[in-house]
Image: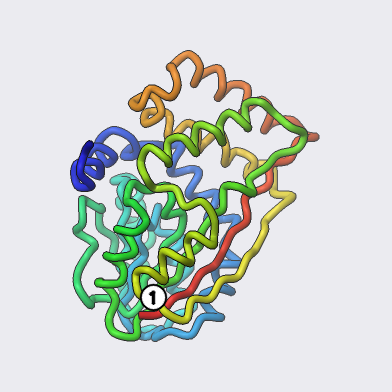
Amino acid sequence: MKNSAESMHAFDNRSYIGSAAGRKRVHILSKILVRSSLSFFDRVHFDKNANGLDIFCGDGTSTRNLSETLGPHNTIHGFDHDATNIRFAQEKIAQHIPRLRFKLLKNDNWYAAKTYAFIYCRTFLNQSYPPAELFQKMYASLQDNGTILLEYFDPSNFHCYPQNYAFERYLELYTSLKNIQKTRIESVGTLRTLLSQNRFQRIQIQQIAPAFLPEDCKQISSLCLESIGPQLQEHQLITPTELQALLSELKSFEKQKNTMICLPGIYQVVGYK
């Protein structure tokens, strides 16, 4: 069994860096969630003139969105596994908003005791940190009375219309991979329990449910399958031939005019140290 540092190193070098599919998926998610995320940030009471962290920040779009609701005197640090994401964020976003600072995430270089007044994290279940370990580090990284803001996708509510084998097989593979990586949270109830066990208090949860999405948003499933393909093959969950056939069938389904893919329930979660 690999330890967490070894797992993170393997994940960095083989699976995610340079994944065009992964980056496109993050970009689409940011476009889908921008309005609800801005409302979320505006609704939560936390120190908006202090320093914060956007962990797994993607191409920096979520960090920029977060900054729009904050005061002018704070600094937000964005960390991500993907070197291309970070380069984009540095060149296209930080150049115009100097108080946003982006770095490549390597092992635990984001983690620093009592550094941040708030920590934001979206799609953390797609990362290789076991959730309990991630929340422990988040808690330690927060200043006293600090705030954690999460947007969590509950895969159990992910569905399509009409029923499709490729989509169901994708969900099955995704779940199997998360179980192997020990990064799966079974439900929002489990998430709340994990936060409580890691000493977060005054936990608040709100659900939103995007549906009837624009055509390009239906690509979320095939983009995710493509981005986790190397990991699925590494763990012998799928052969290269089956992966290509599955991707072909899923993309064909997504392109059909009479099909619909709805994102799973999205929970916006707040906790305090």
> Residue at (37%, 45%) from the top-left corner?
182
Q: Name the residue at 57% across, 38% down.
A: 221
Q: Position of residue 202 (x, y in %)?
A: 47, 81
Q: Is residue 250 left or right of residue 100?
A: right
Q: Secondary structure at mark 1?
A: loop
Residue at image mark 1 = 200
**Mark count:** 1
Of residues 192 and 47, the one nearer the viewer is 192
Rendered image quadrant of residue 181: top left
Q: Residue at x 41, y 28 (%)?
A: 232
For residue 165, side relative to residue 229 (left or right): right
Relative image position of residue 160 (x, y in whole percent): 70, 39
Q: Quarter of the image holding residue 101? A: bottom left
Residue sitting farthest toward the top: 241
Q: Is residue 39 above or below residue 186?
A: below
Disc 1 residue type?
Phe
State the quadrant of the C terminus. Answer: bottom left
Vertical placement of 156 versus 249: above or below? below
| Circle 1 Cα neighbour tier, 10 Å, few/some/many (<14 / 14–19 / ≥20) | many
